[in-house]
Amino acid sequence: MWKTLFSKLKSIDYLLLILCSALTVIGIISIYSADESTAVHQFHGFLGGLAIAVIVAFFDYHFILRFRWIYYIANIVLLVLVLTIGVSSHNAQRWLNIGGFQFQPAELAKLLLILFYASFIMKNSERIKNVFFDLICLGLVIPPIFLVYRQPDLSTSIMLATIFVCVMFIGGISSGLVAAMSAAAMVGVPVVFYLALMPDSPIVRPFQQRRILAWLHPEEYAMTEAYQTMNSLMAIGSGQLHGKGFDTNEMSSVLSGGYISESQTDFIFTIIGEEFGFIGACSVILLILGIAIDCLIIASRANDLGGKLIPTGMAVWIGFQGFLNIGVATGVMPNTGIPLPFVSSGLTSLWSIYAGIGCVLSVRMRQDDPHWAVYQREELYDMRM
């Protein structure tokens, strides 16, 4: 038993764990500047997240993927509960409070979506180029995306759609369908953008429309919707190369002056830019990039389709969501209210993403398993039953 345990410990991707841990520690340090008590809470969450990742890694991902319909149904049920009995805050109803524990099901939905489609596509790999099957996959992703959109949470809806498209592409959908989807996107994106800016827009709510307009014309919304972003840009720029120092109390500090709200969540990158400067900001970007690349390397070496789709989905989640969050803080994107992976405060996001990393580690560990080929044949047979 000890020999088996030792061999599995040797096959863990420690580089991936180190990159994730380093990014989380940077987040905890930055959160401390905004709220000391939240930083302590986040540190405990970090320890729990590491434990979750390691525990999940020791489960074979084939076993994890068996429960695809449980993941899908649980996802739908939780998102419906949010809309019926959820907790509201800041013009949105995104949280569930069960037994005193408050969490955000939309964050968990990303992981459940990855696991469901990794299993569903793997089970039906010979049908992936069939247009009818692709339509079934599309039909299954619409309910969770719609339920998240209704919270309203447009940014997470976009994240779910992006994960779905990338997983389907890696799953092997036909090149003709990819071309058709690309052409539809080229036409559809400008149309959606136009509809979003219409008076009484049919696709976005008034506060969401104002955020888009504030992004396009920040000077006109400098004291309202663009206030956060403009102060964020000022704070990041003031950090210069080395930053103003950890937990700075300089009179010129935008954070200390209280000009950035939600600084420990959506605008955590602002704290990093101001206190640790260009070097700190680049470090965060490189860590996010390194984690995404490591996941893609694991996907490229996976032994089967399910093993490719799990790390790919996680790479898209971490990389694209990181781009969205940093884009908001630097004025490249409209204010979306989406957390920075591993860095922003919030246990639902942190534990969900560490559980996903645990699944990626499970894929990596099975690449070196000498008994994997026999186990794979038995597992695939069981999955098709």
Image (tube, helix red, strand yellow):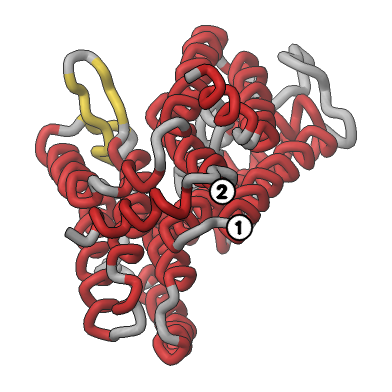
Secondary structure at badge 1 equals loop
Image quarter in which the C terminus is found:
bottom left
Which quarter of the figure has residue 189? bottom left
Which image quarter: residue 123? bottom left
Which numbered tag is attached to residue 367?
Answer: 2
Does 272 sit above or below residue 378?
A: above
Amino acid type of the residue that numbered disc 2 sits on in the rendered structure: Gln
Q: Which of 70 and 111 lies nearest the eye of the viewer? A: 70
Residue 332 point in image, percent of width and height:
63, 57
**In-image side of 354 versus 144 (left or right):** right
Residue 111: numbered disc: none
Which amino acid type is shown beneath numbered disc 1?
Arg
Q: Name the residue tied to disc 1.
A: 301
Q: Position of residue 298 (x, y in %)?
A: 60, 51
| Comparing labels 1 and 2, the label whose residue is closer to the camera | 2
Residue 198 location (% of width, % of height): 35, 72
Q: Residue at x 66, y 18 (%)?
A: 29
Q: Is residue 188 left or right of residue 382?
A: right
The answer to whether marks 1 and 2 mark residues whose Cβ atoms lie closer than 8 Å is: yes
For mark 2, give the secondary structure. loop
Kindly identify the residue that appears in the image at 79 percent across and 28 percent down: 276
Real-space CA distance between mark 1 and mark 2, rounded to the nearest whole angstrom: 8 Å
Residue 225 in the image: state x and y as whole percent.
Answer: 48, 46
Q: 191 and 149: which one is in front?
A: 149
The residue most toward the left is: 84
Label 1 packing within 10 angstroms: few (<14), some (14-19), many (20+) = few
Classify 10 Å Cα crowding around label 2: few (below 14), some (14-19), many (20 and above): some
